[in-house]
Image (cartoon, helix red, strand yellow):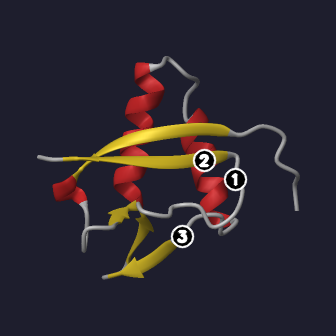
Amino acid sequence: MRIIKETTEVTLKVRKSFLLNKKWLCVQVVSALLQDEEEMKKLGYKSLRNKFYNSISSDKYNTEKFIGMDFINVEEPMKAMASLTLKFDIVED
């Protein structure tokens, strides 16, 4: 197990229509939002997404599998400390 040396906090704006049962967001949508954030802030290629994928594989986020796809809980996304701390801001359509 590796030690987390630095954490990055990211707040993503999510449209309410993207949510399943008002609290679940598809992991692929989160990845696309992180890609937009990387491009907007001119970060390195996949700098946020690599942290995200590593944290998912280490079971750091509250995720569930629905209809064969992984979803993350937007109300309480963190299960444990991770190198990428996610927060979600839900906006109306």
Q: Residue at x 61, y 44 (%)?
A: 50
Secondary-structure class at tag 2: strand
Residue 28 shown left or right of residue 44 in the figure:
left
Q: Which image quadrant for residue 89? A: top left
Distance (Cα) linking label 1 and label 2: 6 Å
Q: Residue at x 72, y 56 (%)?
A: 81
Q: Residue at x 84, y 40 (%)?
A: 5
Residue lying furthest top: 42
Q: Which residue, given by chain and number where applicable, does mark 3 sit on? A: 62
Q: Residue at x 46, y 78 (%)?
A: 64
Which badge, 1 or 3, comes first in the chain's sequence? 3
Residue 69 shown left or right of residue 64 in the figure:
left
Q: Which mark is residue 85?
A: 2
Secondary-structure class at tag 3: loop
Q: Of the residues shown, which amino acid type is indicated by label 2?
A: Thr
What is the x, y in percent for residue 2? 87, 55
Secondary-structure class at tag 1: loop
Between residues 87 and 65, which one lies in front from this camera angle? 87
Quadrant of the frame with the N terminus: bottom right
Between residues 29 and 12, which one lies in front from this camera angle? 12
Q: Are marks 3 and 2 in contact (CB under 8 Å)?
A: no
Q: Which mark is residue 82?
A: 1
Mark 1, Cα crowd under 10 Å, few <14 / some 14-19 / many 20+, is many
Q: Are marks 1 and 2 in contact (CB under 8 Å)?
A: yes
